[in-house]
Image (cartoon, helix red, strand yellow):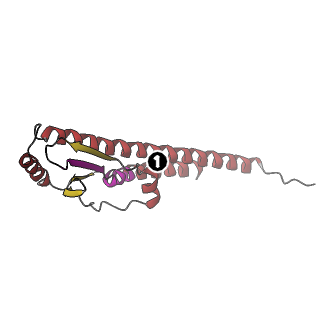
């Protein structure tokens, strides 16, 4: 039985290469994990802020149908909201729908990154106190596309830096 022995130089190169691959892989995973946490936190913050602002603008209780119509008209005057989609329904009938603003083309985000950092859908539903029947319901849904695009821009820079460092050390 013959065993091929590797030279010391080859063993060192293999060890160094494996160590660099592990370091770069760990760095990539940690960076992507941090981006995922950041995207989730920003989406949750946007929904929370929207709920607080809506609550501050609600007509007092008990509100008449006219007061609610006025409130819905004011809400409907808002420009398309970044990061949020708002819908007000009366029973099952949509009364107002404010879609999220259209995405600005700030550069493509790879599908694998979008999949890795996209948070679970954040959707909040609040029943609005109303004398009107059927009752009004506010639906707020977070749209994380902008956060994902921002996270990609930051993450791409860190990943390229990791690869450049690995290339400088190993290359």
Asked if 81 appears above or below 54 in the picture, the reply is: below
- The residue drawn where x is 28% and y is 46% is 125
Q: Is residue 138 magenta?
A: yes
- In the picture provided, is 82 more to the left or to the right than 164? left
Q: Secondary structure at mark 1?
A: helix
Q: Estimate the x, y position of residue 116 in percent, counting from the top left.
A: 46, 52
Q: Estimate the x, y position of residue 135 in percent, counting from the top left.
A: 20, 47
The crowding category of the residue bearing disc 1, from other C-alpha atoms within 10 Å (few below 14, some 14 to 19, many at least 20), is many
Q: Is residue 124 magenta?
A: no
- The residue drawn where x is 57% and y is 44% is 23
Count all numbered tags in the image, as a single digit: 1
- Figure quadrant of residue 46: top left
Q: Estimate the x, y position of residue 60 in percent, counting from the top left.
A: 10, 37
Nearer the observer, 57 or 156: 57
**The N terminus - image quarter:** bottom right
Task: Single out the residue that lies furthest toward the front.
Answer: 133
Nearer the observer, 146 or 20: 146
Task: Single out the residue that lies furthest toward the right.
Answer: 1
- The residue drawn where x is 53% and y is 50% is 168
Q: Which residues are magenta?
A: 133-153
Nearer the observer, 140 or 65: 65
- In the picture provided, is 58 more to the left or to the right than 142? left
Return the residue at label 1.
32
């Amino acid at each position: 039985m013959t065993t091929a022995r590797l030279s010391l130089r080859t063993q060192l190169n293999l060890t160094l290469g494996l160590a660099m691959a592990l370091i770069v892989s760990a760095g990539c995973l940690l960076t992507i994990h941090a981006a995922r946490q950041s995207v989730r936190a920003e989406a949750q913050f946007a929904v929370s802020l929207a709920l607080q602002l809506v609550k501050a603008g609600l007509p007092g209780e008990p509100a008449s149908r006219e007061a609610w119509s006025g409130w819905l008209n004011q809400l409907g005057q808002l420009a398309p909201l970044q990061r949020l989609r708002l819908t007000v329904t009366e029973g099952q009938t949509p009364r107002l729908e404010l879609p999220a603003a259209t995405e600005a083309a700030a550069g493509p985000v790879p599908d694998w990154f979008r999949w890795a950092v996209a948070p679970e859908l954040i959707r909040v539903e609040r029943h609005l106190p109303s004398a009107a029947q059927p009752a009004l319901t506010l639906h707020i849904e977070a749209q994380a596309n902008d956060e994902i695009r921002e996270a990609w821009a930051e993450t791409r820079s860190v990943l390229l830096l990791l690869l450049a460092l690995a290339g400088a050390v190993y290359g």
